[in-house]
Image (tube, rainbow, N blue to C red):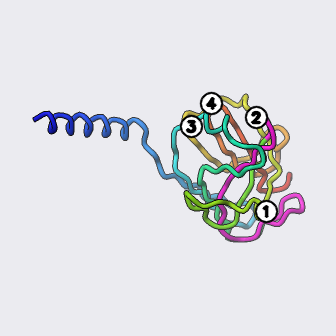
């Protein structure tokens, strides 16, 4: 009897936890110039400890995928058609660079940082708070005005990487 009661308690608590924090699969389709672009990701609760413990110079990812049907060139940097894992490299306390790693990075894979494509990036911790990891492709603002930017929101962190040159 106690075993059945324990099972029911664990089952209901687990069910409530799953419902309270759904991991939604999202995708965004955008045309940048003539290039069909798709961004795919899962939402998950933001974890400030992850950011605090991120090492300088190391690749961090939220496992978002960016697919380009054609080539992009941004500020002289070529981004060939293909699939990429979206990530960031911490340069310092309040300095991050958005990067694209060619291919799909698996959960336990170790990325080869020498292969990343660094995007012109803008970091801020004053753009509000996102309770869950969120990505978007949108028109930039501030230093990114006139550009299409890939935006990564994680708690109070905002990181934008340019996917086009300013018009």
Q: Of helix, strand and loop, which one carries label 1?
A: helix
Q: Quadrant of residue 106?
A: bottom right
Whether residue 2 appears in magenta in the rendering, the answer is no
Question: Label 1 neighbourhood size at 10 Å, few (<14), some (14-19), many (20+)?
Answer: few
User: In whole angstroms, how far apart are the C-alphas of marks 2 and 3?
Assistant: 16 Å
Q: Position of residue 148 (x, y in %)?
A: 75, 52
Residue 27 image point, x, y percent: 55, 55
Q: Is residue 51 left or right of residue 107?
A: right
**Do the numbered discs 4 and 2 sit on residues whose CB atoms are within 8 Å?**
no
Circle 3 — which element?
Answer: loop
- On whether residue 88 falls in the magenta region, the answer is yes
Identify residue for label 4: 129
Q: Are marks 1 and 4 in contact (CB under 8 Å)?
A: no
Q: Single out the mark in the foreground, 4 or 3.
A: 3
Judge the density around disc 3: few (<14), some (14-19), many (≥20) Cα neighbours within 10 Å. Answer: some
Residue depicted at 61% across the width and 59% down the height: 65
Q: Earlier in the sequence, mark 1 or mark 4?
A: 1
Residue 17 occupies quadrant: top left
The crowding category of the residue bearing disc 2, from other C-alpha atoms within 10 Å (few below 14, some 14 to 19, many at least 20), is some
- Residue receiving disc 3: 46
Identify the residue position indicated by label 2 in the image: 124
Which residue does the image show at 20% across and 37% down from the upper left? 8
Mark 3 or mark 1: name the one nearer the start of the chain. Answer: 3
Q: Which mark is residue 114?
A: 1
- Which span of residues is magenta-colored? 73-95
Residue drawn at x 52%, y 38% is 45
């Amino acid at each position: 009897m106690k075993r059945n009661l324990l099972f029911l308690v664990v089952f209901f608590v687990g069910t409530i936890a799953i419902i309270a924090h759904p991991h939604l699969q999202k995708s965004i389709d955008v045309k940048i110039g003539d290039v069909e672009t798709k961004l795919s990701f899962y939402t998950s609760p933001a974890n400030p400890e992850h950011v605090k413990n991120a090492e300088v110079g190391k690749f961090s990812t939220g496992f978002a995928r960016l697919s380009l049907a054609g080539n992009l060139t941004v500020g002289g940097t070529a981004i060939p058609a293909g699939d990429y894992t979206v990530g960031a490299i911490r340069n310092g306390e309040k300095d991050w660079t958005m990067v694209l790693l060619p291919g799909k990075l698996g959960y336990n894979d170790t990325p080869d940082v020498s292969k990343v494509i660094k995007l012109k990036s803008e970091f801020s911790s004053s753009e509000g708070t996102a309770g869950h990891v969120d990505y978007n492709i949108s028109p930039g603002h501030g230093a990114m005005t006139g550009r299409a930017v890939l935006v990564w929101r994680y708690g109070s962190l905002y990181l934008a990487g340019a996917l086009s040159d300013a018009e």
